Image: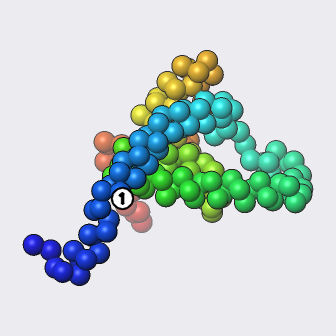
Amino acid sequence: MLPEYVQAWLTPLLSPGVLLGLAIFSGVMFVASLIGVPYFLARLPADYFSRRERTDLGLPKSRRTPGAIILRILRNLLGWILVLLGIAMLVLPGQALLTLLVAALLIDFPGKRRFERWVIGRPLVMKSINKLRKRSGRPPLESRLSWLPPRPSSAPPPREKASGN
């Protein structure tokens, strides 16, 4: 039996209206993720993860116009909403991991490119995304072997030679 303070907190959440609303929300999010996530992943440029950064190419930094700043804020806001929905989909019906992946693509945070390449570099993730892209008639995402961490070799490390006089 649960303590009374926990029961008092859970009772309103278990009402028929809340449960019905949660079921409808789960169904809508499931359908939205089935449509939205593949749509977004299919629209990425094939070289999105493999192109070099602007500074590596010697290109000037883009100007930050008020419209670009507003779009960036809206993109980050949408990304955080998708993070919350992805977390909810971990226990509710929906494509939680793909939704969280799309959210990570939208949000700006330090180390984002490195994280994206690490996730996309997983063979199963790349294979799944490219399968979605193929169904949409889009070319597969370009990948680089350098995204993956080096695999430990089965051979023992070489011994250092003892220095002799």
Q: Is residue 163 above or below residue 94?
A: below
Left or right of 138, for residue 31: left
Residue 6: horizontal and vertical position, in percent?
Answer: 23, 76
Specify the quadrant of the image occupied by residue 153.
Answer: top left
Left or right of 38, for residue 11: left
| Residue, far bottom | 5
Left or right of 147, for residue 44: right
Looking at the rendered image, the quarter that the C terminus falls into is bottom left
Observer-nearest of 164 and 148 = 148
Left or right of 152, for residue 71: right
Specify the quadrant of the image occupied by residue 30.
Answer: top left
Colour scheme? rainbow
Q: Is residue 161 visible?
A: no
Image mark count: 1
**Residue in the image at 63% along x and 22% along y:** 138
Other-residue count near label 1 (Cα within 10 Å), few / some / many at <14 / 14–19 / ≥20 = few
Looking at the rendered image, the quarter that the N terminus falls into is bottom left
Observer-nearest of 150 and 1 = 1
**Residue in the image at 32% along x and 65% along y:** 13
**Residue in the image at 26% along x and 69% along y:** 11
**Residue in the image at 16% along x and 79% along y:** 3
The kind of secondary structure element at disc 1 is: helix
What residue does disc 1 label? Answer: 18
| Residue, far left | 1
